[in-house]
Image (cartoon, rainbow, N blue to C red):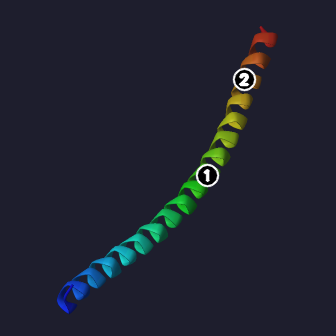
Amino acid sequence: MSNELFDKLEQKVSTAVDTIEMLRMEVEELRQENEQLKNERTQWESRLNGILARFSDLTDDASQAS
């Protein structure tokens, strides 16, 4: 193989490695964001369940008052 072919191969390998590293970093960022969103969802669900429990208490109180 000539030096020109080795240079082209080296450049392609270097580009591929750079792309893989960027994609790994992006995947890690997305995993962190996903974890944060899961935590937020859990908090919202907990708060919503609390609100629904209050409504349930109100309807129970109204039923007993009748």
- x, y percentage for residue 43? 67, 48
Q: Secondary structure at mark 2?
A: helix
Q: Nearer the viewer, residue 41 or 62?
A: 41
Identity of the residue furthest to the right in this view: 64
Q: Quadrant of residue 65?
A: top right
Q: Earlier in the sequence, mark 2 or mark 1?
A: 1
Q: Nearer the viewer, residue 49 or 20?
A: 20
Q: As drawn, which residue projects farthest toward the bottom? A: 3
Query: Dot 2: few (<14), some (14–19), or many (≥20) neighbours within 10 Å?
Result: few
Snapshot quadrant of residue 66: top right
Whole-angstrom CA distance, mark 2 to mark 1, is 24 Å
Q: Image height check: is 40 above or below 30?
A: above
Which residue is disc 1 drawn over? 40
Amino acid under disc 1: Glu
Labels 2, 1: front one = 1
Q: Is residue 48 above or below residue 22?
A: above
User: In the visual, does 65 lie left or right of 51?
Assistant: right
Give above or below for 12 relative to 38: below
Q: Quadrant of the N terminus?
A: bottom left
Q: In the visual, does 2 lie left or right of 61?
A: left
Q: Position of residue 47 (x, y in %)?
A: 68, 42
- Three-letter amino acid code of the residue under disc 2: Ser
Q: Which residue is mark 2?
A: 56
| Whether label 2 touches label 1, CB < 8 Å | no
Question: In the image, what residue occupies the spot 34% across and 81% down?
Answer: 14
User: Which residue reaches farthest top?
Assistant: 66
Q: Residue at x 79, y 18 (%)?
A: 61
